[in-house]
Image: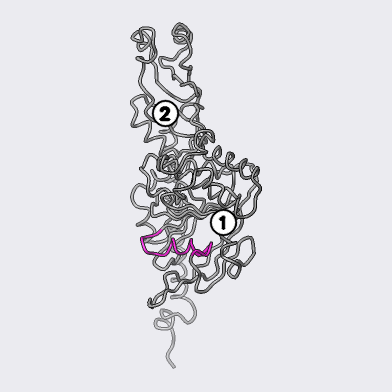
Amino acid sequence: MVTNDAPITGATIELENLTKRYPGNPNPSVDSVSMEIGAGETVILVGPSGCGKSTTLRMINRLIEPSSGRIRINGEDVTDIDPVKLRRRIGYAIQSSGLFPHLTVAENIAQVPRMIGWGKQRIKDRVEEMLDLVGLDPREFHDRYPRRLSGGQQQRVGVARALAADPPVLLMDEPFGAVDPITRDHLQDELIRLQHELHKTIVFVTHDFDEAIKLGDRIAVLREQSHIAQFDTPEAILTNPADDFVSGFVGAGAALKRLNLTRVRDVGIVDFPAVTVDEPLQDLFDRFRSGGSNEILLLDRRSRPYKWLRRGDLMRARGSLARAGALVSHTVSADATLRDALEAVLTDNGGRVAITGRRGEYVGVVDMETLLNSVHELLEADRLTALEHREELAELQESQQHQRSALEGGPGGGAADGAGGEHP
């Protein structure tokens, strides 16, 4: 993820020979895993079903007790401390949110702060702060029960609850696996934005390699028993997988997968003529006449993209914008990836997509030309990287050939002894 100047509030995590054995099973479920995770880093554990990635994650907060090995958080060995106290210091988000159905949204978020002794006013302020942080209006969601929330809203509340006590570490076990693909993309973007602001240490389990590329600073590709096949940056894994096992996870289209490494906010977001629904029709006509654009973006009363308006649409409006223009069907956030933006542009016939901020407010537009230029740059970078690798391989092979020739022709070598040596 791209970082900013916000302070890092995460903690280092060290796993040392972490192992889990279950009675009756001759082989360990997790076998001697060692890993160092930096403060403020997002590390993704990805691997086949049953490889032990969730078990490894849950040993960090000791929901599963290790059979052997050590866990250090900010240098402190937490293997032998009270596991309940440890879990209150570590945020935990799971699939399907795990909210208590009989508690309101506010009561769910307040659970850990209340258990560790925060005062009522501090808890109240924190609940409102966390709802705002995850993009939910406190006035609207404070007193709702989980059953009155969509799947995506429940997951947002789950993340808010996990972060409520301001833990340095956040563990996430396939938290977005039970929602639809569109909601999942939005939740991923939200997590990217949150991490951009908070810089927690996040350990995230998924079976989806595309999700791993999109979210991770580094990815640990795990074999059976959580043996690490490769632990590296997404870019390094995409361009230079360690072996066939890792290549199988990368799959086809590595160059296109690299579109998940660049955020929309890092490319050319441009201004686009925009007006609100309250603006008189005559002012819209004037905007079209004075500007060079044939299209204007209509915003709702909360400054969110609402409709794309063309000149001809106003002629058919007959005094009301309700009948004019085409509804904005797709938007992406500034923290979305170029792949998300490209998919949205290709789905829309206009060759552009509106970019939104944390509350869905309009911030600009990215067009097809900008996205295609970025794709071409990535493909060219891949071509140059592949060329460099071929040159390095050729140099290595040439060096090895020279070494073999020297050994065969040098003192004590077989060729010299057999061909030119005198027999006693």
Which quarter of the rendering shows the C terminus?
bottom left
Q: Which residues are magenta?
A: 47-63
Tell me residue 322's x, y (percent).
37, 15
Q: CA distance from mark 1 to mark 2?
A: 38 Å
Of callouts 1 and 2, the N-terminal one: 1
Q: Nearer the viewer, residue 78 or 125?
A: 125
x 49%, y 56%: residue: 232
Rate crowding at label 2 as few (under 14), some (14 to 19) or many (20 or more) other CA atoms within 10 Å.
Answer: many
Q: Establish if 396 lies above or below 95.
A: below
Tell me residue 51's x, y (percent).
39, 64
Looking at the image, residue 407 sits to the left or right of residue 85; the answer is: left
Q: Nearer the viewer, residue 319 or 17?
A: 319
**Which residue bears the numbered disc 2?**
353
**Which residue bears the numbered disc 1?**
90
Tell me residue 200's x, y (percent).
58, 50
Q: Establish if 341 lies above or below 364.
A: below
Q: Amino acid at mark 1?
A: Ile
The reply to whether residue 387 is in sight is: no
Q: Establish if 310 lies above or below 235.
A: above
Q: Establish if 128 lies above or below 28.
A: above
